[in-house]
Image (cartoon, helix red, strand yellow):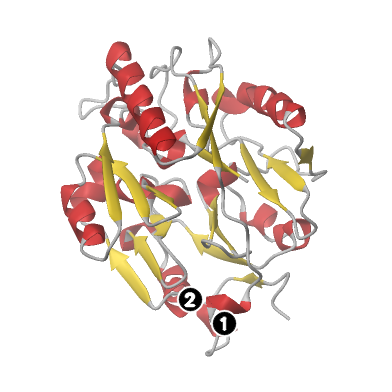
């Protein structure tokens, strides 16, 4: 009954709905990153890329490379297979690998990938490199037509409920509602559409983290009231991250891994304490240089089946 349903409001959700009703999904065991040698801020395509005076942020490139290597080391220490795609000159945001695609294993066990259509022209050149990588690694690209003015920005706006075939989709600044409305049939699973209303939280992964089947971390000011009610109808508990850590430290751009491991920016001390008290193992990493471009840990990593 719920297999290909699009949920847009809480009144659609059965009162006795439990995450265990949805099909189990295999956990990811690998991750894809892009090297940061060409990472910099060349233009302002989101509000985080300029300072208070309106000037473009300046990236400390040696420091950025060190922060990237630190994240890779933590991922490897946690047992993930790390794949790396070379960054490309002229594509400074390619390092944010969560945005160009949505890879998964379908119900028959086949590896598939839904490729993005980026909202901004500055990022559209990234897609072919990712399409080539997926083709070489056994992922079949889904044939999905989008109009020229439609956009879909991969796992920036499409987030899995851990261990289940259920997707939360952000609609608004970067991904169009018209696209999300067609995805349940394309991806073969239910989708909960969440409206993003704050331009500083332009992707769903900047304001929402599904922690497990019962809990999520959320920044309420990023969502419409109706979308918050929808989330409340799914989760037993919505944890509210501190506003200042969401706005400056990208607290809700944390990466949650199997075994209750959480990678989060080291400025998000209160959020780390909140999650640590609930039994999550917190791994603080520095992403200060990448935050200058509007992203943190989750934006820099693409989890792979």
Q: Position of residue 89 (x, y in %)?
A: 53, 9
Residue furthest right in the image = 143
Q: Quadrant of residue 78?
A: top left
Q: Quadrant of residue 7?
A: bottom right
Which quadrant would the N terminus be assigned to in this image? bottom right
Asked if 227 appears above or below 135 in the picture, the reply is: below
Q: Secondary structure at mark 2?
A: helix
Q: Position of residue 102 (x, y in %)?
A: 63, 44
Report the residue at 40% width, 26% height from top. Answer: 44
- Asked whether the beta carbons under mark 1 and mark 2 sit within 8 Å of each other, the answer is yes
Indicate which disc residue 234 carries. Answer: 2
Query: Of marks 1 and 2, which one's residue comes earlier in the chain?
Result: 1
Residue 174 visible in this rendered orientation of the protein? no
Report the residue at 66% width, 44% height from top. Answer: 103
Between tags 1 and 2, which lies in front? 2
199 and 69: which one is in front? 69
Name the residue beneath numbered marker 1.
13
In the rendered view, does 279 fall on the left or right side of 269? right
């Amino acid at each position: 009954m719920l297999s290909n349903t699009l949920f847009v409001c809480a009144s659609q959700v059965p009162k006795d709905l439990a995450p265990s009703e949805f099909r189990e999904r295999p956990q990811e065991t690998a991750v894809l990153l892009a090297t940061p040698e060409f990472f910099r801020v060349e233009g302002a395509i989101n509000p985080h890329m300029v300072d208070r005076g309106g000037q473009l942020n300046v990236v400390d490139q040696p420091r950025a490379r060190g922060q990237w290597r630190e994240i890779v080391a933590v991922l490897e220490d946690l047992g993930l297979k790390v794949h790396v795609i070379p960054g490309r000159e002229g594509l400074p945001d390619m390092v944010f690998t969560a945005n160009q695609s949505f890879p998964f294993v379908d119900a028959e066990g086949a590896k598939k990938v839904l490729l993005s259509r980026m909202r901004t022209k500055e990022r559209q050149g990234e897609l072919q490199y990712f399409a080539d990588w997926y083709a070489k690694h056994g992922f079949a690209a889904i044939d999905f037509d989008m109009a020229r003015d439609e956009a879909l920005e991969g796992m920036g706006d499409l987030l899995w409920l851990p261990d289940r075939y259920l997707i939360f989709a952000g609609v608004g600044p970067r991904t169009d509602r018209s696209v999300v409305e067609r995805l349940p049939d394309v991806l073969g699973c239910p989708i909960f559409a969440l409206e993003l209303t704050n331009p500083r939280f332009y992707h769903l992964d900047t304001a929402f983290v599904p922690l497990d089947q019962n809990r999520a971390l959320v920044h309420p000011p990023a969502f419409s009231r109706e979308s918050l009610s929808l989330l409340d109808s799914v989760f037993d508990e919505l944890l509210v991250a501190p506003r200042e850590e969401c706005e400056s430290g990208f607290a809700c751009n944390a990466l949650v891994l199997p075994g209750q491991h959480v990678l989060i920016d080291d400025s998000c001390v209160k959020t780390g304490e909140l999650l640590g008290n609930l039994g999550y193992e917190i791994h603080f990493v520095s992403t200060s240089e990448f935050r200058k471009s509007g992203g943190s840990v989750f934006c820099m990593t693409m989890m792979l089946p």
